[in-house]
Amino acid sequence: MTRGDLLMLLYWFSDTSAVPDVRGIRGLSRLTRMAIILGHETGLDADIRPYFTWHATPQGGIASVGVWQELLRLRAYQVTVPIASMEAMPKEELAERRYLLEEHIPPHERSEYPLPTEFERDVLTNKGTFFAAKREDQMVARRIDVMKRAANLERLPLAELTAMALPLVRVPAGR
């Protein structure tokens, strides 16, 4: 799964849970927090290191250049589209984006990271909905295939099962 896949699935579950309304995700700050929480809970942060790089901001927020990059890529690929919400940008949102621009994005790249003048809510396009649904189907199918192995694993002798599992243990014996 790529970083873009994770974000697409966040939008997918956000939108499909809001049926009949399409709500999307409000703001980069909210998306960043959801990505770190759900990425960790699904184990994706352990699969791709670093999945995203997270920074604590001086105001107590959480910011990620990677999440911002992926959001801009999804827009460029017409997978998501920003919808203006006709309200001012929240202070936290502006502070976190400015922090990234000043501290983590090289000066020659800053023009590629626009600071919106009004609050944006991103939603999946039809193209994004198709790809997110397809990705979810693939993930479910893969998990089912993995779980089908349970019956065969249960039949193995304990010593063989131990030999398969031991390399996955990260704490040395006796500690």
Image (tube, grey):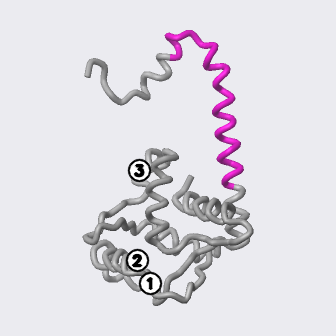
Residue drawn at x 64%, y 39% is 143
User: Which of 79/87 is in front?
Assistant: 87
Residue at x 52% of width, y 46% of height? 42
Residues shaded magenta: 135-161
Identify the residue at image location x=69%, y=37%.
144
In this orientation, which residue lies closer to the viewer: 63 or 142? 63
- Kindly identify which residue carries mark 2: 93
Please name the amino acid that badge 2 sits on: Glu
Q: Which residue is mark 3?
A: 49
Crowd class of label 1 (few under 14; some 14 to 19; many from 20; radius 10 Å): some
**Which corner quadrant of the image does residue 121 belong to?**
bottom right
| Label 1 SS | loop
Q: Residues within 10 Å of mark 2 (few under 14, many from 20)?
A: some
| Main SS, magenta residues | helix
x then y, percent, for residue 173: 31, 19
Look at the picture and state if 111 lies above or below 59.
below
Task: Please tell me which of labels 3 and 1 falls first in the chain.
Answer: 3
Tell me if label 1 and label 2 are in contact, CB under 8 Å. Answer: yes
